[in-house]
Image (spheres, rainbow, N blue to C red):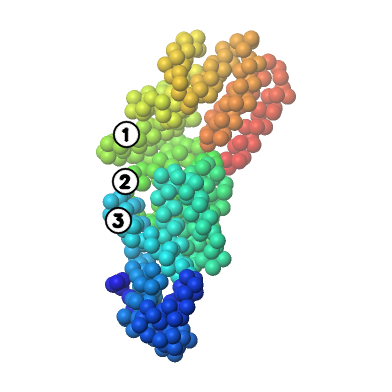
Amino acid sequence: MYPFEDYSDPLIPQRVKLMRKSKKLTQYDIADAIASSQAKVSRAEKGYEKYDKDDVENAKAALDIADMPISDYGFKIFKKRLYHWRNLYRNKQTEEAAELQKELANLIKIEPYNMELPTLYRLFKTSLLLAERNFEAAKEVLDTVKESLKTMSEECLYFYNSRMGVFHAMQRRHEEAIVYFKKAIEISKRSDTFWSIDDEILQYNTAISYTELDAPTRAIVAISKIKRTKFEHRASSYNLGIDITLAINCYKKGIYDEAEEILLDCLLKAQGLGDKHFIGLTLINLGMTHRYAGNWEKAIKYFNQALDILDKGTYHHAWALYMKMRCQVETEKLFDLERELIQTKKSLEGYDDYTILLETLRYIIYLNRNISRYNINAVEYIENTAIPYFIENSNSLEAIECYKLLERHYLRTNKLKQSLKANRAMFEISERMA
């Protein structure tokens, strides 16, 4: 028996009727279940009579929804349990969350007389699937939800658009993600139904997508909306993620002092937590801040510290190594650096994340040394492979640096047309970032 039910709810007979018809049962079947007559069932369904407590429970048992809510009061209690489940897995209380999920999974049984609770359950479940990077299963659930889009409550629409945004963002389709995030934000603006933490996470996800699209101004705007309020329940790692994202967009905008200040504070917090991932991430971005500010020695120092923290063979280790050696191009003898690069490539054979980055470094060194027999290959590789790779991986600043190198090479070799083309490409990237 479901313990939180209002048996006097006048809509219960109508919900029994909906479920009865969906299961192709007759009024006589319900009459048998409640040990009464077909006439009573008919009167109840027409609104002339109510079911008592025993009638309701017996009818629910016959309809295979014995443990599910059927009254408005029952719906409210179950919705609270849904949000409690969502908060359990959000707070990484996995055992409790898994236990409660077994009960909540039965919510799909209450369709068609209630569509909101099963929809919310599916949307919250999507978050778990996305966290597991199970995109195929997540898409299947979202497609199921989409079928009821026209009749969906605003609350469900909010979470649907938010989850669709995350679904696209996690597959690096950030323009599509932002479309869905904006729809969710619009719903939030006209409603007071949603918790502030959900809006905060929505703005953070929006900022991440703008960051990945190299649109720093818009990312900073999204983060500023988060910064207006403080929440005690924020996890420290979540705070670090917000602040590091803000710093990244500051140095992309050329606001180097503020970026450094934010990142130094993040470094202290990450060290206090003993969080290796965030320590490494903060050190990389301190290096990036100084790299684009032209402080090569300082940048190299931070990249070396990051390389000591990060695991070899990881994506972030590859970028830290590239950036360190890219700064060395500006500060060290290129012949010695070329030999160091050869040794580095040998030690990293089999790690795919390094291939394009190390090959790019080789050709950058050739162009800087102005080795004529390699110049054509170097220009072709940097223009057709390296620059698209940097743009795809949200580092338009590095793409601009490559175009600057190409521009200098073209000017040195009196190829003015190609020089103007490189300059125009730099301008277009800068405009897009702005």
Q: Residues within 10 Å of mark 3 (few under 14, many from 20)?
A: few
In the rendered structure, are the residues bearing label 3 and label 2 in contact, judged by CB atoms less than 8 Å apart?
no
On screen, 434 above or below 226?
above
On screen, 242 above or below 231?
above
Residue 211, position as x, y percentages in the image: 50, 42
Q: Tell me if residue 287 can be seen.
A: no
Residue 206 is left or right of residue 423, and the answer is left
Figure quadrant of residue 424: top right
In the rendered structure, are the residues bearing label 1 and label 3 in contact, judged by CB atoms less than 8 Å apart?
no
On screen, 350 above or below 236?
above
Q: Nearer the viewer, residue 71 or 353?
A: 71
Q: Comparing marks 1 and 3, which lies closer to the viewer? A: 3
Residue 410 is left or right of residue 143, and the answer is right
Figure quadrant of residue 63: bottom left
What is the C-alpha distance between the residues marked 1 and 2?
14 Å
Task: Give the quadrant of the N terminus.
Answer: bottom left
Q: What kind of element bears circle 1?
A: helix
Task: Give the quadrant of the C terminus.
Answer: top right
Amino acid type at mark 2: Ser
Q: Tell me if residue 377 can be seen.
A: yes
The residue pinned by badge 3 equals 99
Identify the residue at image location x=51%, y=59%. Answer: 145
Nearest to N terminus: mark 1 or mark 3:
3
Q: Residues within 10 Å of mark 1 (few under 14, many from 20)?
A: some
The residue pinned by badge 2 equals 236
Identify the residue at image location x=43%, y=63%. Answer: 108
In the rendered structure, are the residues bearing label 1 and label 2 in contact, judged by CB atoms less than 8 Å apart?
no
Q: What kind of element bears circle 2?
A: helix
Q: Nearer the viewer, residue 113 or 319?
A: 113
Nearest to N terminus: mark 3 or mark 2:
3
The residue pinned by badge 1 equals 276
